[in-house]
Image (tube, helix red, strand yellow):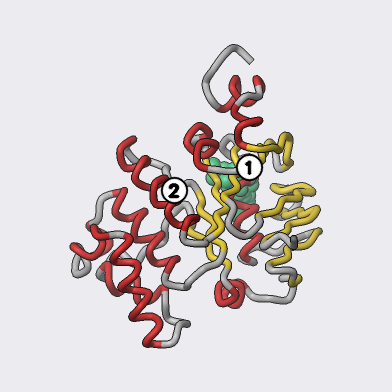
């Protein structure tokens, strides 16, 4: 089977500083794959390069078998690759509904209306607050809006950058339940997280990123049982 997303030997640099070095990873249709790692390991850089927001210094990104080198970020979104950035990047002075509508601006009008209905079904909280300004939402609601807006582009693969960041445990559980639901509805997920425990619980497979490189990869069960991961990322043992 061809991977839906196949990243091979990808390197990304900021000036002279390489933030991602020779990373290879894949996500198949229907999978949840996580990339865990400490602050500054290069996880966000990896996602931004996968979407084409940052140029690759080396290596390839393939989506659905097609080389993305010459495909602009917004056209990658049109093909079904979407990113919910760590900063969530909402339009704070616009309503919840208008933020969502913007997420579907490439979609034909009738389909966009249908997709908006599906997003409101998935996130009843957003439906309740459809007329509220995005800037006045709680942290959890903002994350839901960012995910809902991404879903408006009808992605086949959703990349999520730290969806649990700054959220209370109850809300984190809600967000992870939504991630599981999305997979069940056929959306593949590439999940970047510092909350390794929650990420490994949700994912089928994972990669550990350290200083721009993949240091360990395997099934979530293997990773969760790896003493190096337990010590460094799960807060267990003494390393
Ligand atoms: P975090 O969880 O803190 O966001 P991360 O694993 O996502 O960490 P990145 O944000 O990808 O890591 O950062 C990787 C490295 O690249 C870090 O050393 C960071 O300082 C550097 N970096 C990130 N963005 C830029 C930038 N715009 N210009 C220069 N260096 C950058």
Other-residue count near label 2 (Cα within 10 Å), few / some / many at <14 / 14–19 / ≥20: many
| Front one among 65 and 213 | 65
Q: Earlier in the sequence, mark 2 or mark 1?
A: 2
Query: Going by the image, does 61 lie left or right of 177?
Result: right
Which mark identifies residue 116?
none
Q: Secondary structure at mark 2?
A: loop
The residue located at (58%, 67%) in the rendering is 81
Q: Is residue 94 above or below residue 158?
A: below
CB atoms at circles 2 and 1 under 8 Å apart?
no
The image quadrant of residue 211 is top right
Q: Where is residue 43 shown, x and y percent of the image? A: 61, 46
Query: What residue is pinned by disc 2?
Result: 163
Q: Secondary structure at mark 1?
A: strand
Q: Is residue 97 above or below residue 181?
A: below
| Front one among 12 and 27 | 27
Query: What residue is pinned by disc 1?
Result: 205
């Amino acid at each position: 089977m061809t991977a839906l997303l196949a990243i091979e030997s990808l390197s990304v640099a900021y000036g002279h500083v390489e933030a991602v070095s020779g990373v290879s990873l894949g996500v198949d249709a229907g999978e949840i794959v996580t990339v865990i790692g400490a602050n500054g390991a290069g996880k966000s850089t990896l996602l931004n390069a996968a979407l084409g927001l940052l140029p690759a210094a080396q290596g390839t990104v393939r989506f659905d078998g097609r080389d993305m080198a010459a495909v602009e970020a917004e056209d990658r979104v049109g093909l079904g690759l979407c990113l919910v950035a760590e900063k969530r990047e909402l339009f704070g002075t616009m309503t919840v509904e208008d933020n969502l509508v913007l997420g579907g601006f490439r979609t034909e009008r009738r389909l966009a209306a249908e997709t908006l209905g599906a997003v409101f079904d998935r996130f009843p909280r957003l439906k309740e607050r459809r007329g509220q300004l995005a800037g006045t939402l709680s942290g959890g609601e903002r994350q839901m809006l960012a995910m809902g807006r991404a879903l408006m582009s009808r992605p086949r693969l959703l990349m999520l950058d730290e969806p649990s960041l700054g959220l209370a445990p109850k809300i984190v559980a809600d967000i992870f339940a939504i991630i599981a639901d999305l997979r069940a509805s056929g959306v593949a997920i590439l999940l970047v997280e510092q909350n390794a425990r929650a990420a490994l619980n949700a994912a089928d497979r994972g990669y550990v990123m350290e200083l721009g490189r993949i240091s360990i990869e395997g099934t979530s069960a293997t990773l969760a049982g790896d003493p190096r991961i337990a010590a460094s990322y799960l807060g267990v043992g003494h390393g």
